[in-house]
Structure formats: structure tokens, C-alpha cells
Image (cartoon, rainbow, N blue to C red):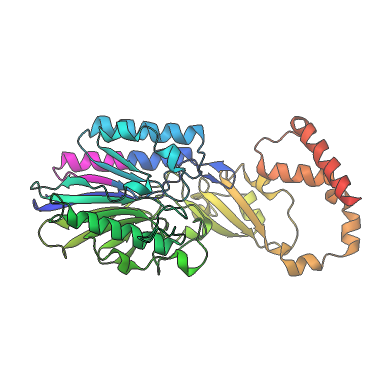
Amino acid sequence: MYNEKMLHILQTGDLHLGKIFYGVSLIADQKFFLEQILDILKESRETKNEYHALFVAGDIYDKAIPSIEAVALFDDFLTQLNLMFPNLPVFIISGNHDSATRLSYAANFLKSQKIFIATDAKKIAEPTILCGSTSEKFAVYQIPFLQSGALENPDGERLSSQSDLLKEAVRRIECAHKENPETKNLKTILNAHLFVLGGAQSNSERIFIGNAELVEKSVFDFFDYVSVGHLHKSQKVSEKCYYAGSPLVYSFDEISVEKNFLNITLDEKNEQNISVRKIPVKPLHKVSCLKGKFEDFYRLDKNKNPELYEKRDDYIELTCTDSILIENPVAKLRENFPNILSVKQEFLTKQNAKEISKRDFDENSENFSPPQIFENFLKDVVPDFKIEEWQKEKEIFESFTKEIAI
């Protein structure tokens, strides 16, 4: 059992619901990790180690206009969450991928259900009171992703950089907190979405350009704990500031990155006592980068290559080491690897491509004609491809290539 004088938070972030990964919808994968959050909360209740709050640090959806499936998935999650844990406060903010307006739909109603969705920069200094094990109170503040011009400084100047926006946001929160007799003596917790200077990033993040978009960790010295989102790697920024990271691998350069939820434990009396435990996320499909001869994958043998056989259901990026061009490799490998997403061919490096002679081109000119290029591409990306279903699009493509050739 947890120390009875502790505050326990389950933290996650960067859900990116509705994400399309190399043309594949990850809705089923995302439903799988959302169910794990419910299981973690259920287990904590059964073992009498209940969490006092759930924090989700932004990028709820992958796009500003999320798919119907993504909205339905999040709606179902919140509904189950509230039915199973009606007294659990849930803190949610909009990230840079979200539409603040769309995410805020029904926020006032959800607030009555203890689901606090923050999307409005004007309300960042409004606290929500959170109680720990001994009814010790904490003031929770939420800073959604701040668009350029969302705040003005005391002189009325509209701020544009993330650094300036966050400094002003924290200034407002600190002033309001100290001036409010109900909060001035309370510990403070922040839920925010931003890029803290020094954080490790990956290709799946929408990275800001320029140092002015990076925020110094010292900006958050006022807070006793900071839950932060935007970077997809679970990581420690400072002794009291952590990224949970994205629950799933969203780019192939993340395959070596552990995906976790965070169990945050705060001592209600000692602000220096913060414990962080990682809870591994179990993926519905693993993500793998593989390399080898095409034949080894095309003629997959469980007995000869059991390790490769175990990866047949993974989301796969394959690098073929063959010295010849393999046509339509994705389509050919889908029978053995139904979730293969990408095939790279070392033969087709820029250097090798330049060495393809005019003779080779002439001998295979049919493969380079607009109709064949169109068909080859669709065979790689469309399951059960049938050209007769794409005649109209094929005609448009041919017409376009003729126009630009004139």
C-alpha cells in the first residue's frame, strides 16, 4: 500500500488518436492502450492503492479535424472512465495537434463529471483543487498549447514565441495563486504542452523551429510538479518535471524508445520527495526495422528463421540488401507480413540510381510508363488492388503526365 500521506497521479500524453501510420489506421492499437489505462486504475483500486488523478498532457487527437473513429474512441474512453471511476479527477489539455475549439466541446458539462479539459489561454490562472490521501489540497493549473498571439504581456504587447508565451502564462498563474487566499498556501501542479529545452525528440513530433520555441526548464520553478507533453520519449526534464511520452511508437526512429505511463507519487508534506515509476505500455503490434535478403522474407520458414517468424504481425520497415531491383515488394510480402508498411531497397540509393544505364531503361521502358508507374504504386499501398476499380484515377494521372510533358 502507498504511503497514506502521498498524492498519486497516473500520467500520460500525446495520444494522437486517429493517427495514420504509413497508410494504416492505428485506432485498434490506440483502443488497446486506452483499455490499459482503465486496467491500471482498476488494479490500483482493487489493491487499495488508488490514484487521485489522471493527467493527459495534450495532443489528444492527431489532427485538428479528427476522424469520426478517433472522436468516437475518445468519447467511449471518457464514458467508461467516468462510469468506472466517477470520483477520479481527469486533467486534459489541448496540444499543438489539437483544435482547441473542437476539444473544448462539452467541457463545461464534463467539468461537472470531474473531467477538466483546458483549451482556453485566458483561463490558465484558474486553479482546480485536488485532494490527496489525507485531504491535503493541491492547486492544479493547466496550460494548453499556446498559439502565437494567445497572450499579451503587461504592456499589452501580443506575444508570439513559445518561450515568451510560457513565461507570461506562468507569471499570471504565480500572481493569481499568491493573491488568492484559498490557494496561496497550497502546493502547485502544472499540466502543460510544450518543448522544454534539452528534451530528446523524434521524427513523429511536429517540431518547432528556432530556439525561441524552446522553453527553459527554470520557467517552471514555481511549481511543485510539472506534467508535460509534446515530446514522445518518456523522459525526466528536472527533478520535478517529466514527459510521459506517447503511448505508442509513431515513427520508425522510436523503436528503441520505451513507451510508458508514469506513476507519480508526491509527498504531501515534503516538496522534494517525488517518486516516478514507469508502467510499460503493451502494444497491440510491435514496430520493427528489419534488414536482409528479400527471399528470406518472401519464403518465410518458421523452422529456419523462428526469430523472424515471431515478427510476422509487427508493423515493419524492411531494408532489402539485394543487388537487384525487387518490383512491388510490399504487395509480395503481405502474405507473410500482413502489417508490413515500408520496404527500402539498398540497390536504389542515389548513387546506384545514377548508374542505371539508358540500355536498362529502354529494356524496361514499359515499367516506366505512366500507366505502369500508377499501377505499381497502388499495388504497393492498396490491399487487394484491382486496376479496374481505379480506371478513372488512372486516366486522370495519365492526362496529368501528358500535360506536364508538353
**Residue 224 drawn above or below residue 58:** below
**Residue 162 drawn above or below residue 365:** below
Q: Is residue 251 left or right of residue 13?
A: right
Is residue 397 at least partly visible in the picture? yes
**Residue 385 drawn above or below residue 93:** above
- Identify the residue at image location x=27%, y=55%: 173
- Identify the residue at image location x=52%, y=59%: 203
Residue 23 position in % (x across, y down): 59, 44
Residue 198 position in % (x across, y down): 40, 70
Is residue 265 at least partly visible in the picture? no
- Identify the residue at image location x=49%, y=40%: 18
Q: Which residues are magenta?
A: 37-54
Q: Nearer the viewer, residue 296 or 179?
A: 179
Residue 247 position in % (x across, y down): 39, 50
**Residue 12 drawn above or below residue 45:** below
Q: Is residue 197 left or right of residue 189?
A: right
Residue 373 position in % (x across, y down): 79, 47
Q: Quadrant of residue 304?
A: bottom right
Magenta highlight on residue 312:
no
Q: Is residue 303 left or right of residue 375?
A: left
Q: Nearer the viewer, residue 398 or 59?
A: 59
- Identify the residue at image location x=66%, y=39%: 382
Q: Nearer the viewer, residue 202 or 348?
A: 202
Magenta highlight on residue 53:
yes
